Image (tube, helix red, strand yellow):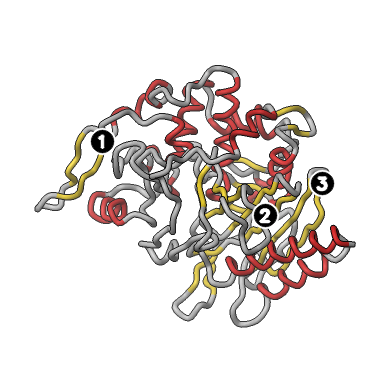
């Protein structure tokens, strides 16, 4: 893939220059053996230090697959029954009720769920939980009843009503934060300690954590917002909390892109890492397949808080499903990603994919809100497309 570097460098350059730009980006591509491409362009903060490969990002929901991996390890060891009530391991989830709307006084109308939520349902995002930036109901609970944002890292932010009975439909939300609580209940440790011992150390992932070291703090990229004209405004006072009340398995990690590539390689290599095995090959094989039932459809994410998210969807018109815990494109994607590949994204416009068929994967990291940014997201699509064009050219050579 000798033509990979100029093609991908051009994409990074195009999104970090001109009037419509991102402040900075780090992007990488790997195969099963090691990195094929590593690029950085732009700045960590607009007008500041140059972006570099060792820049630390708030990786938001690209945390989810890592927390899901810790749950899969519990399944392998016979410690977690995915179809048992999740309250068996995380009792607090058993106290949550379903919200059916609001009464005439604006108070939530709550009832008991028809069944207990299971860890399988949590992993698949059919447990009943949402996010306030994708759910009008949660948005109203936040605005009128003080439901905290998940970015607070607080326990109250996840101890929310269910939007529907478990299993009723697919809705993206705080389900994986609860998976983290299940893992903590089983292991008797904070999720960060579990991940360090059982995922990060076997994969030689050093600079990734819920709480940054002083060295990581000095290299952290600033999150930016788009103003009304599409310009960039540094959000210097906005960051995920270090030392959070809860290690949020759904979104709470900080890390560098080179570290995440090691996690991607583990999935490309059937669960093996440089310092030991993380998952069994047979676990990987079933974990990347859809677990949804016919009535549970993955669709567009409606942006109900415009400062945090636009309406967002990968590959509109392409059938998609959900695995443990990734989006699966059930049909070939226009970028070149084959059917059955997996991937997902993080709120501040980070994106990744893992293609086990071709043995490649990649990660694109920016720090911009709202999600589905009009420059970063198309830039990522162009990045992935260029990677596949180079792969096709290499196979033809």
* x and y percentages locating residue 327 in the rendered image: 54, 48
Lower sequence index among marks 3 and 1: 3
Q: Earlier in the sequence, mark 3 or mark 2?
A: 3
Can residue 210 be spotted in the picture? no
Residue ID at (73%, 41%): 268
From the viewer's perspective, tell me whether residue 83 is left or right of residue 6. Answer: left
Q: Indicate the quadrant where residue 198 lies.
A: top right
Disc 3 is placed on an element classified as loop
Q: Is residue 105 left or right of residue 277?
A: left
Q: Is residue 33 above or below residue 184?
A: below
Q: Nearer the viewer, residue 252 or 214?
A: 252
Q: Residue at the spot x=68%, y=61% of the render?
A: 384
Q: Secondary structure at mark 1?
A: loop
Name the quadrant containing residue 128.
top left
User: Whole-percent x and y of residue 30?
Assistant: 77, 50
Asked if labels 2 and 1 touch by Cβ distance under 8 angstroms, the answer is no
Please rate how many residues cluster around mark 2, counting C-alpha atoms within 10 Å: few if below 14, some from 14 to 19, many from 20: many
Q: Which mark is residue 97?
A: 1
Q: Residue at x 66, y 32 (%)?
A: 199
Give the CA distance from mark 3 to mark 1: 47 Å
In the rendering, at what x and y percent does residue 90 appear?
Answer: 41, 26
Point out the image quarter for the N terminus. Answer: bottom right
User: Callout 1: few (<14), some (14-19), or many (20+) C-alpha neighbours within 10 Å?
Assistant: many
Quarter that holds the C terminus: bottom right
x and y percentages locating residue 179 in the rendered image: 47, 33
């Amino acid at each position: 893939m000798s033509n990979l570097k100029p093609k991908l460098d051009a994409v990074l350059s195009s999104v970090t220059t001109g009037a419509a730009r991102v402040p900075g980006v780090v992007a990488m591509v790997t195969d099963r053996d090691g990195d094929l491409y590593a690029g950085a362009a732009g700045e960590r903060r607009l007008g500041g230090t140059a972006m570099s490969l060792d820049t630390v990002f708030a990786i938001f929901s690209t945390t989810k697959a890592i927390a899901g991996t810790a749950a899969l390890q519990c399944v392998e060891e016979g410690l977690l029954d995915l179809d048992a009530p999740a309250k068996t391991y995380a009792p607090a989830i058993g106290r949550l009720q379903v919200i059916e709307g609001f009464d005439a006084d604006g108070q939530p109308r709550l009832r008991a769920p028809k069944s207990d939520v299971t860890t399988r349902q949590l992993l698949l995002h059919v447990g009943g939980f949402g996010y306030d930036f994708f759910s009008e109901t949660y948005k109203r609970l936040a605005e009128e009843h003080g439901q905290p944002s998940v970015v607070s890292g607080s326990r109250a932010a996840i101890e929310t009503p269910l939007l529907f009975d478990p299993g009723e439909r697919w809705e993206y939300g705080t389900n994986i934060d609860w998976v983290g609580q299940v893992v903590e209940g089983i292991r008797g440790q904070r999720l960060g300690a579990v991940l360090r011992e059982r995922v990060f150390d076997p994969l030689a992932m050093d600079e990734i954590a819920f709480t940054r070291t002083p060295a990581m703090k000095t290299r952290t990229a600033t999150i930016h917002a788009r103003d009304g004209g599409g310009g960039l405004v540094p959000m210097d006072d906005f960051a995920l909390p270090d030392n959070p009340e809860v290690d949020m398995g759904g979104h709470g990690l900080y890390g560098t892109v080179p570290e995440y590539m090691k996690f991607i390689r583990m999935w490309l290599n059937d669960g093996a890492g440089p310092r030991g095995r993380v998952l069994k090959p047979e676990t990987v094989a079933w974990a990347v397949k859809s677990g949804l039932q016919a009535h549970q459809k993955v669709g567009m994410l409606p942006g109900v808080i415009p400062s945090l998210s636009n309406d967002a969807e990968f590959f509109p018109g392409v059938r998609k499903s959900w695995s443990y815990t990734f989006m699966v494109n059930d049909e070939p994607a226009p970028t070149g990603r084959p059917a059955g590949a997996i991937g997902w994204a993080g709120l501040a416009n980070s994106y990744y994919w893992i293609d086990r068929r071709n043995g490649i994967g990649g990660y694109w990291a920016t720090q911009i809100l709202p999600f589905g940014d009009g420059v970063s997201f198309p830039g990522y699509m162009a990045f992935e497309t260029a990677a596949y064009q180079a792969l096709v050219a290499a196979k033809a050579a």
